Image (tube, rainbow, N blue to C red):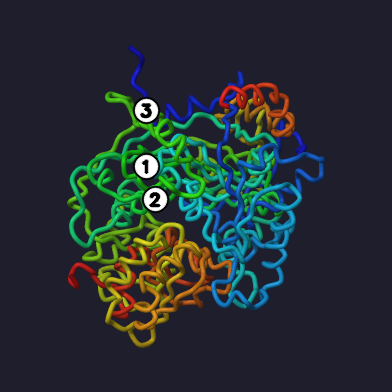
Amino acid sequence: MTTPRTLFDKVWESHVVHRFPEGPALLYVDLHLVHEVTSPQAFEGLRRVGRRVRRPELTVATVDHNVPTGDRSLPLDDPIAATQLDALAHNAQTFGVELFDLASPRQGIVHVIGPELGLTQPGMVVVCGDSHTSTHGAFGAFALGIGTSEVEHVLATQCLVLSKPQTMEARFRGRLSPGVTAKDLILDLIGRIGTAGAAGHVLEYTGDAIRAFSMEERMTVCNMSIEAGARAGMIAPDETTFAYLEGRPRAPSHRDWGRTVAAWRHLPSDPGARYDRRVELDAAAVAPQVTWGTNPGMVTDITGYVPNPGDFATADERQAVERALAYMALTPGTPLAGLPIERVFVGSCTNARIEDLRAAALVARGRKVAAGVRAMVVPGSQQVKAQGEREGLDRIFRDAGFEWRNAGCSLCLGMNADVLRRGERCASTSNRNFEGRQGAGGRTHLMSPAMAAAAAVAGHLVDVREWS
Amino acid sequence: MTLTPFVRHTGKCAALPRANVDTDQIIPKQFLKRVERTGFGPALFHDWRFLPDGSANPEFELNQPEAADATILIAGANFGCGSSREHAVWALAEYGFRAVVAPSFADIFTANCFQNGVAPVRLSGDGIDEVLRRCRAGRGVYRLTIDVEAQQVTDDAGLRAPFPLEPYRREMLLRGLDEIGRSLLEEPRIAAFERSRT
């Protein structure tokens, strides 16, 4: 009998092209996603020494990080951003890479369009010059973010040099309570294990709560694996995965479907497979989460309070909390519910898929954004936007006073015009509350789409469970 | 890209003893629109280094007179977490840092360091505490030697602290290797792998 293997072991072992005697493996890449910000230097590197893209047909590009989300009939008013978009268009054409550009109905955040097109599939190795590539692990792929030099390496060789990470199982017992979402689950985990809690490891999420999740919810969970420091996050494929993929434009054809799915069914971790580390959580005990500090591990229940630096164990932690509270302009002991906000962002590769927008719309329906609050909804892709409009979500949001915008990364990292002003406090469905992330001096509170929509209406942070 | 080999380096230290310094702090997003690998040094730690009016923030560690001309950054745990942006390493290198010494680093940041010949030197808790203590006591004249070949950090007052390096990465640093060139030597294996899957 063979040794039981994890999902990750199986994907890793089937992609090793060569093991270097000095340690790492040359790992084959099935799908390389490319965007405008981390690729120009990589293409330039190829050009300088006359290298080609080895497998352009396994490489797909889009524009998302710096694109405007307002009126797209107007020329870009940011000449440096325009240069970066032009560079990608030129590089895609020169090297024969497919590009979903600003004019494409398929344009969107790279981690939203990959799954949406059916490009992301179980058992693949997926890379992109973006840390949130972990999102694609929701399909049972090994998906990881890489730097620009590695982007160049993958373009040239279709391989990545990587030492095998360790594995960590995060098992969620039971089911989530009403009003609690996948976002709350992953924030709760990061709060418990910390922002370096899974460093050097591939996280595999297991348990009843994960099995019950839709693909959108699974993507939200895997997306934030990097915020726990993980190399990647993965969820074993099952009927939910197959049903999501079937019929998508780049999914295996109808003719190959049965054979492909049969192969995918071998991917889940074998009974008795060994993980290097394990953590187990009670999903039913998770409450809606909201961050109070300047990294995603600085998080607590919406019913909680701004913590006191003195309550932390080490001098390093106390110093970090003091610095975070000073930046966030928060006083220890303040209840988080009731904290006034000026901005709301529903968007990002974490929470801008159709289910996220539906959840926010359900809260916004028939209500109004509070006076003095600017709230925006930025769909993850133009396809999500179109779907939202077919369902009338745009009307619900607009009637409530939300802005309904075009797809892109937008206020998650503020590389375009969508930024917080200094001192503004934002209820955000994105993934990072780092200092200045949404704009220099801006203050970010991470939460679920329903919680963000409720905050928009109330004008302050609020426990959405009281509304249902 | 061929790099300058890194066998050993002796240089002045600057301390930034904060945990979880993310790449958004190392190089904020408003500077990521360049299409070159250069031009990021002046924006290193921008939002910490400069006040909103553009003047130097006198409280920031790297703006202290004793941090001038440092080539080795002593940092806190989980340095370089967050975004995969290699621009963070380009900024550190262009500013003048040849090595970062910390108790731990984020995974993608570590990979990006090796690609650019910047040494991510991981010291044990005791080792980093001692280096920090000596750096503070040295008041701007504390120098370390990062010896990649011997995998140890030393100073001229008897400190000797080992650090781990994967043999492959050590070799890359020592020889200034171009990783793409190295991998392309395996082209026949890549081609065979591709044939085996179709």
The N terminus of chain A appears in which quarter of the rendering? Answer: top left
Q: In the image, what residue type sits under mark 2? A: Met
Q: Residue at x 49, y 36 (%)?
A: A124
Residue B25, x across and y down, in percent? 55, 59
- Frontmost of labels 1 and 2 is 1
Describe residue A305's horizontal placement relative to residue B137 as left or right.
left
The chain letter under disc 1 is A
The chain letter under disc 2 is A
> Mark 1 or 2 closer to N-term?
2
SS class of the residue under badge 2? Answer: helix
Q: Viewer-proximal residue, A302 or A36? A: A36
> Mark 3 or 2 closer to N-term?
2
Q: In the image, what residue type sits under mark 3? A: His
Kindly identify which residue carries mark 1: A242
| Residue A102 image label | none
SS class of the residue under badge 1? Answer: helix
Describe residue A426's horizontal placement relative to residue A209 as left or right.
right
- Frontmost of labels 1 and 3 is 1
